[in-house]
Amino acid sequence: MNRLALRGLRERKARTAFTLLAVVLGVALIAGTFVLTDTISKSFDKLIATSGENVDVRVVAPDTGDDFDSATATFPASVAERVEQVDGVAAADGAYREGFVTVIDEAGERVGPTTGAPNIAFSAVEERFDPYEYEGRAPAADGEVALSEKAAQDAGVSVGDEVRIQGVGEIEPYEVVGLATFGGAGSVGGAAFTVLTLPDVQKVTGDAGKLTEIDVQAEPGVSQAELKRRVSAAVGTNVAVRTGEEDQAQQSQDLDEILSFLTIGLLVFGLIALLVGAFVIFNTFTITVAQRTREFGMLRTIGASRRQILRAVVLEALLIGAIGSVLGLLAGIGLAPLLYALFGAIGFDFPSTALVIAARTIVVAILLGTVVTLLSSLVPAIRATRVSPIEALREGAVGTPKRKRRWVLAFEAGVAGLGVALMLVGLFAGLDSSPALTLLGIGAVLVFIGVGLLSPLLVGPLASLIGRPLKATGGVAAKIATGNAVRTPSRTAGTAAALMIGIALVAFVAIFVNGFKASFSGAFEEAVTADFVVFDNSGLMPEAVAPAAAALPSVGTAANLRVGSGKLASGADVALAGLDPKLAPDVVKIDWVDGSDEALAALGPQDAMLKDDWAEERKLEVGSAFEIRNAERRPVRLTVRGTYEDRGQLFGDVVIQDRTLREQFNSKAVLAALVAAGPGSSEGEVRSELAGLLDRRFPTLDPQTREEFIDSQVGSVNQILYVFYALLALSVIIALFGIVNTLALSVYERTRELGLLRAVGTSRRQIRRIVRGEAIITAVMGAVLGVAIGVLFGILVSRPLESEGFVLALPFVTLGVLLVLGALAGVLAAIAPARRASRVDVLQALTYQ
Amino acid sequence: MSVTTTSPLIVSALDLRRTYGEGDAAVHALAGVSVDFPTGGYTAVMGPSGSGKSTLMHLLAGLDRPTSGTVAVDGIELSALDDSELTRLRRDRLGFVFQAFNLVPVLNAEENILLPLTLADREPDRDWYDELIRTVDLGDRRTHRPSELSGGQQQRVAVARALVHKPAVVFADEPTGNLDSTSSAEVLSLLRRAADDYGQTIVMVTHDPNAASYADRLVVLADGRVVRDEPAGDAEAVLELMKTV
Ligand SMILES: Nc1ncnc2c1ncn2[C@@H]1O[C@H](COP(=O)(O)OP(=O)(O)O)[C@@H](O)[C@H]1O
Ligand SMILES: [Mg+2]
C-alpha cells in the first residue's frame, strides 16, 4: 500500500509539483521572515556589542528610547562633570544622540533619504566610544560634519565639500570632513546620520547645555557593576545608570520590539499564504480521491482494509507536506537575502552578517507545512475510505455530486457565522489590541472556511451569471465551459475559494486605505482653514518658518502647529499640540464640544483644551486641573478651558499654548506652519512670496496649498498599499497554481470527452476556449466572493473606527479592477491546461478504457 | 438496394497498412486493405476481435494516419490535410457514432445534436432538424442532459448528431455494443432509415450479425485483410458466413 502512495506521486508529476508549490510558497515566506529578522537582529546585536565595546557604564535620561517623534529626553551637561570625578572612571564623554537635522547640498537639495526617513544627528565622541568608521575623519571642531556614506554618495557630496545644516534655528554652513559608516552600512534602516561636534548638535537641536547620554569607561580592575554603583551614587535619581551589558541588552530589546512588528507583519502574510495553500491541497486531494474511486474500489474488492486505504492517502499527503516544507524552508533561506536586497532597494539598509538560520526556523517551518498539508488532506482521505467495493464496477462518471445533508449545510453556515461573531467580539468588546486582533484574525479565517464550504451552492447561479457575457461571444465553447464549471460544484468552489482569500484581503486593504484617505482629507479640510501648509515629510521643521512667513506682505496670518509629548503620572503617553492662541483662529477651525474660539484665543500658559473622549475617560471637564510630566519628569500643571472633537487626529489629546509646549516640554521644532493669505492677496501672490522665502532660508521646504498637502499625504499612503499588495500577491499566485491544478486534473479526467469533441470536429482553438472559459468562470467567481467578503470586512472593521472619524468609502474602481484581474488570472492559469487539452490525442482518448 | 459500381465513390481506401510497434513486436493491424464505398451505401464491417475493424474506421475517418496507403473522402486525399483541415473535414463532412461516451455531458440532448453546426457557427436547417427530432423520437426529452437519458436514447441522440449536418458519410463503431436488444433495434432502424430515406452513406463496424443484417453490404476483415465483400443477408446468413471465416 505504501508503494501505491509513492507511485501516485511519481505518476502525476505535474499535480505533485503544483501541490508542492502550494506548501512551498507559504512555508518559504514564513521561513524567510524568520531568517530575515533573525539576521537583522543578530547583526544589530553584533553592532551594538562592538560599538559599545569600551562602554562599561552608560548614563541616560530616564525615558530614553521611547519614540522618535517626541522630544528627545535629555539631562544637563553638568552631570558629565560629576561622572568624571567618580573614582574608577578612566574616561567619560557626554554625548547627544538622536537629534534631527536637515542637511542641504550646494544645489539646495536635501542630503539623505527623500522617502520620509529621518536624518539623525549624533555628537562626535572620544574615539574609544565612537561607533562609526570614517572615510576622512570625525568632526573635531565646530563647523565640521561627517555625513553617513550612503546619503553623501546619493547626493554626490564628498569630503571637503560644503553643506548647510538646518536644525531648529537658522541654517548654517559646515565643512564635510568625513563619510561615516556604521557596521559597514552607509545608513541605518534607511535613516541617514550626521555627526557633529557636541556644541553643534546642541545648537541645531536647540538643546544647549543638554546631553542624552554619557559613555563611561572603567579603570582596569573596576567591574561594570561596581562602577555603576559608584556613578549612580554620584549622579542622583534624575538620570538612569546602566552597565554596558545592561545597556546593550536594553538596546537589543528595544530593537527586537521594533523588529517584532516586521516579524509579525510578514508572518501574517505567510500564514495567509499557507491558508490559501491549504485550500489548494484540500481541493487537489479531493479531486484525486474522486478520480481514484475506481482504483480504491478495486483495492477494496481484493481485500484492502479501510485503514490501509486511509494510510495510503495520508502517507501521500505526509510526503507532500514534508517535501514541500523542506523545499519551502530552503526557498525561505533563499528568499531572505532577496527580501534584504528589496529593503535595501527601497532605502532600508541593514548591516549584514551571515544569514541566521535558527533551530526554531527549521522546526516551525517544517512542522507548520507538514501539519497544514496533513490536515487539508484528512477529509479527502476519510472520504477515500468510504469507497465501497462496488464502485470499482460502476459505470459512468466518478464523483457525481451528492446533495448535501441539511445538517452539513447548517454546520458550514455555523462556521461562517462563528467567524463573523468572533470578529464582532474582537471589534466591539473593548479588548486589548492583541487579543482583539487575534480574535479578528481567527474570525476572518473561519469566515473564509465557512464561505468556502458553502460556496458550492453559489456555483450554479454565479457561473451562469459570469458565463453569460462569455456565451454572448464564445458560443458553444462557453456553454460547455459553463457546464463544466457547474458539473462538480465543490471542485469549482474549492478552487475559487483559494483565490477568494487573496482577493478579499486585497479588497479589504484597498477599502480600508481608501476610507483612511477619505477620512483624513475630510477631517483636514474641516480642521485647517489656512490656505497654505509648509510641512517637512522627513520629520519636524524649524519654528522660524511661521514668523518669517508672517512678515511677507501678502500673508495674513502664519502660525506654527507644534507637537510634542508628555506622560501622565500613570506613565501613559499624552500627545500634545501647541498653538498660538492669538493666531490659531485664523488658520484652524476646532470642533468645540464645550468651548469656543474665544476661549482658545484667551488660552493662558497653564491652560489646556482637551480632546473630548480623552477628557471624559479621565473624568476631566472645563475648570478641572491636572498634571502632565515633561521629559525631565517635571510635572506641568494645567487647567482645562475647553473640550473638542478631533476626527482627523490633528491636535493630539491636549492642546496647549505653543510657548508652553516649547519651553516646558522642550519641543523645539514644529510639525507644520499654517499660512493664511491676507485680505485681498491672491493665492498666486502668496505662493510666489512664500516660495521665494523658503528658497532663500529653508531650501528643502516648499509651500503647498491645503489641497496639494492633502493629495501628497494621501499619496504617500499608497506606498504602504503597494507593499501590502505585493505581499498578498503571493497568496494570489498560490491560488493561481490551484486553478492550474484543478484544470489539469479535470482535463485529465475528461480526456475521453475532449477526444470525442475533437472527433466530431471541434478545433484545437475551440478546445482551448472551453478550458479557458472554465478557468475564467472559476477565477471570476473567486474574485466576486473575495470582493464581497472584503467589503464585508471593510464594513465590520470600520464600525468601531467611525467614532474616531473613519468614514467608509468604497473604492469602486479598484474593486472593479479586481474583478477584471480575476478574469485575467483565469486566462493565465488556463494557458498550460488548455494547451494540454487541445493536444489530446483523439484516437487514444477514444480507445483507452 | 444493391451495390452499384456506377455510383460515385464517397470513400476509397487503397492498400491501407497500419503497423503498431516495431521489429519483432510489430503488430500489423491492417495488412493491405483496399476498399471503396459508393455514395448512399450502408456497409457493415465485421470480423473477429482484433481483426482491424476499428483501425480501418479510424483511418477512413482521418482520425489516424496509415503507415502506408491512401484514403480519399469525398474526393479529398486525407494525407494531404493538416490537423486543422482534418478537423474541419470531420466537422463538416463526417458523422460519428461511437460505442460509448458519445455525448458531451454538460450539453442537453438538443445541444448535443446541434454540436457539429454550432462548432461550425452554422444555423441548422430547421425542417431537417425537426424531421430528425421526429425520427429520433425523443419526445419531451430534448432538453435533458445525457445523464438523464437511457443508453438507447443516448445513442439515438448520437445518431441524430451524426446526421444533423448532412455529412458525406457516417462512421459508426459498434454503435449497439452497449445496448440491449430493444434499444439496439431502435438505433439500427434509425440508421437504416437514414440510408433509405436520405441516401446517407454509412459505414458501421459491428460484431453482431443481427446488426450487420440491417446493412446492404458486408465487409469482413480477418488479420488485417478483407476476406469477404458481398451483399449482406439476414442475421442467420451473416452468422453462417462468419463461421466460415
Ligand atoms: N494503439 C495501439 N497500439 C498497439 N496495438 C494496437 C493499437 N490499437 C490497436 N492495436 C492492435 O491492432 C489490432 C487491431 O485492433 P482493432 O482495430 O482495435 O481491432 P478490432 O476493432 O477489430 O477489435 C489488434 O491486435 C490491437 O491489439
Ligand atoms: Mg474495435
Image (cartoon, coloured by chain):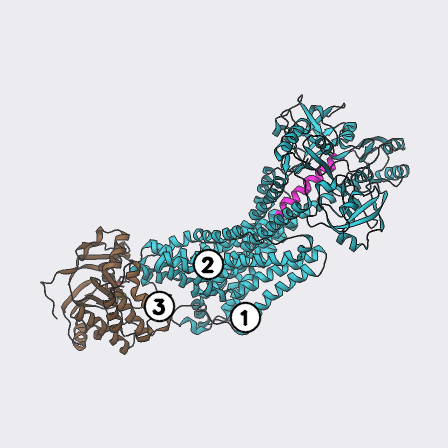
Residue A668 placement: quadrant: top right
**Ligand 2 placement by image quarter:** bottom left
Which residue, given by chain and number where applicable, does mark 1 sit on? A409
Which residue, given by chain and number where applicable, does mark 2 sit on? A778
The CA distance from mark 3 to mark 1 is: 29 Å
Three-letter code, disc 3: Asn
Is the residue at mark 3 from the same chain as the one at mark 1?
no
The colour with which the image depicts chain A is: cyan
Magenta segment boundaries in residue numbering: A33-54
The CA distance from mark 2 to mark 3 is: 22 Å
Residue A514: image location, x then y, percent: 59, 50
Disc 2 secondary structure class: helix
- In this rendering, would A250 be left or right of B112? right
Disc 1 secondary structure class: helix
Chain under disc 1: A
Foreground residue, A255 or B12?
A255
Residue A505: image location, x then y, percent: 57, 54
Three-letter code, disc 2: Thr
